[in-house]
Amino acid sequence: MARRTGGLNVLPRLNQQRVSARLTAAGSTISPMSKPKAAVADDLRLAAAVFRKDRKATADFVNRYAGPIYSYLSRRLIPRADLVDDLVQEVFLAAWESLGAFQGQASLRAWLLGIARHKVEDHYRARLRDPEPLAGQETETDALLSVEPPIDTLVDRDRLERKTKRVLEELPEAYSAVLLWRYWEHRSAQEMARCTGKTAKAIERMLARAREQFKRKWQDE
Amino acid sequence: MNSSEPNERFLEDLAGALDSDAAESAAPSKLKAKVYSALARRQQESGPLLGLRETHADGRGLCVHEQVVRIAPVGSKAGAFNCCSLCHARVLAEALDNPPIYWANCPYVGFKQS
């Protein structure tokens, strides 16, 4: 599971008490309670209680946020559904390690999703570093593909989602990772190149091959 | 026009359509149970959990086992003991998605109810 990375574990007890007090104070001084402010105060109170190692607050923390994290990771880790559970756990453990730094500027949910996003990008980075699948009979560009996007005609969202999942699952992992990173996480080829140590051109070529395979399998479905 | 543009648009539209109103799926209770257990273990690596007396004083409900530990004439160290680590509810909740556990204020029961 997740490795231990310092953070709270190495904080002296005094420092833990100080951070916990800061979180609690920040949570209690927000007034009057407009809805967003009340939500921030609630987040800060929960973070402070988890930081104090209150077991019930910790259970509440997991109960509230496991769903959004699980949902996000399930959508982003196709075709590696087998990794989702481990990564959900890693997100919570990483959150615990850096909970002292939580300021309440974003909601706890957004903060946790940020950690999850980093984990997903670590996964994509590792996949893109793997040797690329053999191109076989594929063409270098996706010029041959001419079927119009059927998005508008596929009104059944569930069907669309299932089909996308199936197609992504059939692709080599590097291809599904590069497509998810580009189109679902909105990262540019330059950004992906920086993260992986490849050139932008190499990423563009990989994207072109991935798009072509995706579209071909989509049409075959 | 760049030959890849239609496919770019196709994937952009597809991602947009799927992400825009993505329904949030609930995490399996078994997963929540495992995550909670792992988190409690990790918390204990840097010292004991908050004592049961303090937890109770904060207005949080304790399960029947925790109540016994709380009122027992034991030191504060025992009061910080993680009863769940020995409890069969944890074992069942980590193994089953609808475990046959029902008592009040048990976190593992809470996972299956939400």
Image (tube, coloured by chain):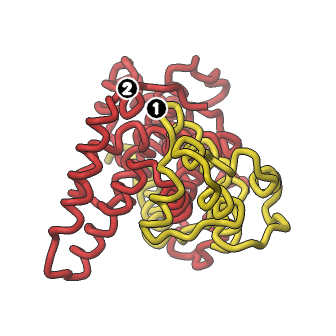
Chain colours: A red, B yellow
Instruction: Between residue A219 and residue B103, name the one nearer to us.
Output: B103
Along the viewing direction, whichever of B2 and A40 lies nearer the viewer: A40
Quadrant of residue B20 within the rendered picture: bottom left
Pointer 2 indicates a residue of which chain?
A
Q: Quadrant of residue B69?
A: bottom right
Q: Residue at x 45, y 58 (%)?
A: B54
Q: Position of residue B23 (x, y in %)?
A: 54, 71
Q: Is residue A81 visible?
A: yes
Q: Residues within 10 Å of mark 2 (few under 14, many from 20)?
A: few
Quadrant of the image containing the C terminus of chain A: bottom right
Closer to the camera in the image, A78 or A51: A51
* Depicted B75 relative to depicted B19: above or below: above
Residue at the extreme right of the image, as rendered:
B100
Which amino acid type corresponds to the residue marked 2 in the rendered image? Val
Give amino acid for label 1. Ser
State which quarter of the image contains the N terminus of chain A.
Answer: top right
Residue position for label 2: A10
